[in-house]
């Protein structure tokens, strides 16, 4: 039985790069459209957001994110958004991977690069993009 992998930005830094992310986005958009459901649970300003999806031929995924904007003072070092994504095998239902949600939603530049690559002129004189810059370092 294969072991469930935990993937975060520190677990496999040599395998995480912009081009790999862009290639994965392109490959993902060539698959059948996902069946998606969303749920939101609230308690005051705190939220639990769940997105469940299934892509034929790939499997099932559940991404859960908590939003706690007013966390207790003793927990101020924690980010107000935290999450995990669980990937399940399509045939067996086994959890194949746990992925830190920051890798999936915390960084927008790969999506911007993908968009620029698809819709920008082939030989532009200049190109500008603004936004959060971060992971990965190479």
Image: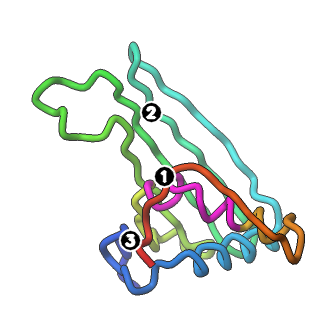
Main SS of the magenta part reads helix
Q: Can you identify the residue that label 3 sits on?
A: 7
Height in image: 21 above or below 87? Answer: below
Determine the residue located farthest toward the top in the rendered image. 44
**Span highlighted in magenta in the image:** 102-113
Front: mark 2 or 1: 1
Q: Is residue 106 magenta?
A: yes
> Is disc 1 in contact with disc 3, using a CB cutoff of under 8 Å?
no
Query: Mark 1 or mark 3: which comes first in sequence?
Result: 3
Asked which quadrant contains residue 117, the reply is bottom right
> Is disc 2 in contact with disc 1, using a CB cutoff of under 8 Å?
no
Q: Position of residue 1 (x, y in %)?
A: 39, 86
Asked which quadrant contains residue 12, the reply is bottom left
C-alpha gap between disc 1 and disc 3: 14 Å
Q: Can you identify the residue that label 1 sits on?
A: 106
Residue found at x 68% / y 59%: 112
Q: Position of residue 86 (x, y in %)?
A: 47, 60
Q: Can you identify the residue that label 2 sits on?
A: 48
C-alpha gap between disc 2 and disc 3: 21 Å
Front: mark 1 or 3: 1
Determine the residue located farthest toward the left in the rendered image. 74
Disc 3 packing (10 Å; few <14; some 14–19; many ≥20): some
Looking at the rendered structure, the secondary structure element under dot 1 is: loop
Front: mark 2 or 3: 3
Q: Position of residue 105 (x, y in %)?
A: 53, 52
> Is disc 2 in contact with disc 3, using a CB cutoff of under 8 Å?
no
Height in image: 106 above or below 69? Answer: below
């Amino acid at each position: 039985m294969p072991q469930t992998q935990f993937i975060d930005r520190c677990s496999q830094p040599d395998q995480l790069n912009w081009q790999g992310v862009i290639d994965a986005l392109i490959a993902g958009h060539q698959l059948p459209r996902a069946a998606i459901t969303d749920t939101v649970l609230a308690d005051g300003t705190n939220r639990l957001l769940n997105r469940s999806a299934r892509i034929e031929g790939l499997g099932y995924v559940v991404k859960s994110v908590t939003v706690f904007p007013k966390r207790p003072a003793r927990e101020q070092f924690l980010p107000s958004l935290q999450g995990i994504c669980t990937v399940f095998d399509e045939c067996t239902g086994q959890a194949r991977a746990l992925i830190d949600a920051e890798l999936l939603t915390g960084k927008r530049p790969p999506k911007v690069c993908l968009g620029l690559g698809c819709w920008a002129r082939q030989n532009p004189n200049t190109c500008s993009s603004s936004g959060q810059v971060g992971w990965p370092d190479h």
